[in-house]
Image (cartoon, rainbow, N blue to C red):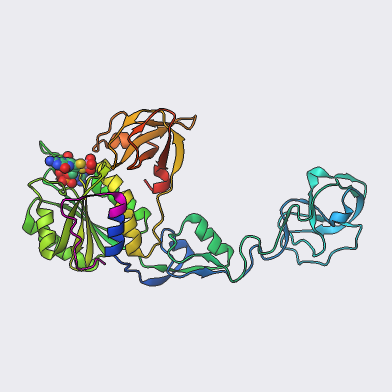
């Protein structure tokens, strides 16, 4: 939900950090909890902490197939008192001076503190010859070493990833309390924008942004209503937005947010709520419109597809996190040596399409066009050049944001 006050920044050019601060101040969670089976919870946001009801692992167990012994008995040849299988009922330790054959995952009897891998022993008749020098605890997975009973295993606000679902299952949970999905209405704008499958008129282009945005939103666990393409007509746009607002938490549009004349989106949103047009110190992704239609949040992204993707990842993703009850997480980055030279303005953040070579070097796309979608499909990552950077030389370390880690 957006506050009713709009955040007029006048003609100031906002840094990304300033924009994110304004977003955090103006938008609030609309989260409502619901209970879901684990299988349906991927991508959803946890509505409550998951507190572990048990230790993980639940009992001391073997990490390897081999022989469970006392550390004091190492370096000797011992008789084998029996075999312990995974899933077998835990048994008491055999007397000192004996070994137990043990398989991975089997409960280690209390008192035995080393599992010697079977590759490291020599079996001769009924005796197993053990190496010396292993420290107590070797190859024993201790009860509770991963998670302790009573500990928060998964925190509220976590957007659930496959490994989170796996952990919940390991804790014995078959359902999770998650936030209901954010309901997002999607429009493209512009008379030139044509739905794929239709004939392309002279001057027309196919609508790449809606399917691209829709896919990005699905990755974030949103429910997407695709409401098509809005013609450049203020009345039509106003009616469509007014109709979409009540059933949605966020309306997203692309196109029509720069200084152009055919900007009916702005006028329509203004009459239905409030809107601010931001100019950001960000390339690509300079223009961004944010506001509300009634009580529904509104974000208007730039029309150029690559600019739209960058705006989405840098600004709309955190907005979606806020609205959906997720704890916003910084975009993960890695550092790679630059395989390129690049000069830039101080004070602006830039994202360049890069491929990562087999040697780990980041090679920038020599073209920088914000409309070049095919070139984006050939990139592995975006290099993030911060506000303070004025030049990149080959070999300089640069931040790279792997597109796959961003759901793109
Ligand atoms: N005089 C100025 N002109 C422009 C400025 C500026 O500051 N002053 N900013 C430029 C930048 S940067 C960008 S980005 C674009 C943003 O423009 P809009 O958001 O108003 O978008 P449109 O003009 O409607 O479209 C831009 C471009 O993208 C194509 N487009 C639009 N929708 C789609 C879609 N659904 N699928 C594929 N492509 C789409 C559209 O045809 C245009 O080519 O403004 C610059 N101009
Ligand atoms: O900065 Mo506009 O957002 O391409 O290319």
Residue placed most toward the observer, 284 or 224: 284
Which quadrant of the figure has residue 404? Answer: top left
Where is 16 relative to 249, above or below? above
Looking at the image, residue 398 lies above or below residue 86: above
Q: Across the whole image, how many numbered discs are drawn on residues?
A: 0
Is 307 covered by the magenta stretch?
no
Q: Position of residue 276 (x, y in %)?
A: 17, 57
Residue 21 visible, this orientation:
yes
Give the residues drawn in magenta, as a range. 1-18
Residue 385 placement (x, y as % from top left): 35, 39
Residue 81 point in image, percent of width and height: 88, 58
Quadrant of ligand 2 in image: top left
Closer to us: 104 or 158: 158
Residue 91: x, y in percent?
A: 80, 66
* Residue at 30 percent of width and 67 percent of height: 28
Residue 371 quadrant: top left
Along the viewing direction, whichever of 27 and 74 lies nearer the viewer = 27
Quarter that holds the C terminus? top left
Judge from the rendering whether residue 130 lies leftward or rightward of residue 396; answer left or right. Answer: right
Front-most of 250 and 27? 27
From the image, which quarter does the N terminus lie in? bottom left
For the stretch drawn in magenta, what is the main secondary structure? Answer: loop
Q: Is residue 194 left or right of residue 383?
A: left
Identify the residue at horizontal 36%, vertical 28% (top origin). 341
Q: Quadrant of residue 204?
A: top left
In the drawing, does residue 127 fall left or right of residue 263? right
């Amino acid at each position: 939900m957006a506050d009713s006050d709009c955040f007029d920044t006048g003609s100031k050019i906002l840094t990304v950090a300033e924009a994110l601060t304004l977003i955090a101040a103006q938008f609030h969670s609309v989260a409502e909890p619901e209970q879901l089976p684990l299988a349906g919870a991927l991508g959803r946001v946890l509505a409550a902490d998951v507190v572990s009801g048990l230790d993980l692992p639940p009992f001391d167990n073997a990490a390897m197939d081999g022989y469970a012994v006392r550390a004091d008995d190492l370096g000797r040849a011992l008789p084998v008192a029996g075999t312990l299988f995974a899933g077998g009922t835990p048994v008491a330790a055999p007397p000192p001076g004996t070994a137990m054959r043990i398989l991975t995952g089997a409960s280690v009897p209390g008192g035995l503190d080393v599992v010697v891998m079977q590759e490291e022993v020599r079996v001769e008749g009924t005796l197993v010859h053990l190496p010396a020098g292993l420290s107590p605890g070797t190859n024993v997975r201790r009860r509770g070493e991963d998670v302790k009973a009573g500990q928060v295993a998964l925190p509220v606000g976590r957007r659930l990833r496959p490994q989170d679902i796996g952990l919940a299952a390991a804790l014995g949970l078959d359902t999770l309390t998650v936030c209901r999905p954010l309901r997002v209405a999607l429009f493209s704008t512009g008379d030139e924008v044509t739905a794929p499958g239709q004939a392309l008129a002279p001057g027309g282009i196919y609508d790449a942004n809606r399917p691209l945005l829709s896919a990005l939103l699905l990755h974030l666990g949103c429910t997407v209503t695709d409401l098509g393409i809005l013609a450049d007509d203020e009345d039509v746009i106003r009616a469509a937005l007014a109709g979409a607002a009540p059933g949605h938490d966020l309306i997203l549009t692309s196109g029509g947010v720069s200084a152009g004349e055919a900007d009916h989106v702005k006028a329509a949103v203004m009459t239905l709520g409030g809107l601010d047009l931001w100019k950001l110190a960000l390339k690509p992704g300079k223009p961004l419109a944010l506001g509300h239609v009634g009580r529904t949040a509104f974000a208007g992204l730039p029309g150029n597809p690559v600019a739209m993707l960058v705006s989405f990842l840098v600004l709309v993703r955190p907005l979606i996190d806020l609205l959906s009850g997720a704890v916003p997480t910084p975009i993960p980055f890695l550092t790679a040596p630059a395989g390129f030279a690049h000069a830039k303005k101080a004070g602006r953040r830039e994202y360049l399409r890069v491929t990562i070579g087999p040697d780990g070097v980041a090679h920038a796309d020599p073209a920088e066009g914000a409309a070049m979608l095919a070139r984006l499909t050939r990139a592995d990552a975006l290099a993030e050049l911060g506000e303070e950077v004025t030049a990149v030389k080959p070999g300089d370390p640069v931040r790279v944001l792997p597109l796959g880690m961003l759901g793109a």
